[in-house]
Image (cartoon, rainbow, N blue to C red):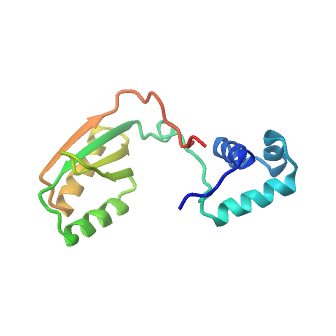
Amino acid sequence: MNVQLDALDRKILRAVQRDAGQSLDDIAKTVGSSKTPVWNRMRKLREAGVIGQQTVLLDPEKLGLEACFFVLIRTSEHDAEWQNRFLETLRARPEVLEAHRLAGDIDYILKVRVANARAYDSFYQALIAQVKIHNVTALLSMEELKSTTELPV
């Protein structure tokens, strides 16, 4: 379901995507409005599900999580039981930042953040011990060129 957004809604969304921790006064000043209309619009955007969970972004390298792997998974299993076990396994692994089911030759892609190659191998060994996987290819990201959580609104 698409929500109808006007120019002010879009300004508010851009402002809170850049920094959700800023005060209502700062958001209102940034978008050129007063606090009450901004607060009302933010409330409506939350109720509509446009604004969801608010969180903070941590620097993975400063936390010792220097290796980012993209893991390509092919499986010969496609039944509901396997899919449920696979999903439960992924949800239980904090190293998995993202998981996507794909169209095409690869069934799934995971974004995995770990300290190093040895930590990735531990993750890999645990994954294949819990679910049957036909083929796994791990790609190490050498450099992150762009990363954002901001949507183009």
- Counting labels gives 0
Foreground residue, 109 or 130? 109
Q: Could you say where residue 124 lies in the image, as x and y percent from the top left?
A: 23, 50
Q: Could you say where residue 117 lies in the image, as x and y percent from the top left?
A: 28, 38
Foreground residue, 29 or 117? 29
Compared to residue 149, the image places residue 81 above or below, namely below
Foreground residue, 126 or 48? 48
Residue at x 35%, y 46% (from the top left corner):
112
Residue at x 45%, y 27% (from the top left corner):
145
Residue at x 54%, y 43% (from the top left corner):
149
Residue 99 horizontal side relative to residue 46, left or right: left
The quarter in which the C terminus is drawn is top right
Q: Could you say where residue 94 lies in the image, as x and y percent from the top left?
A: 40, 55
Residue 99 horizontal side relative to residue 131, left or right: right
Q: Could you say where residue 20 lies in the image, as x and y percent from the top left?
A: 68, 49
Residue 39 horizontal side relative to residue 63, left or right: right
Residue 102 horizontal side relative to residue 31, left or right: left
Residue at x 18%, y 56% (from the top left corner):
128
In the image, farthest residue toward the bottom:
81
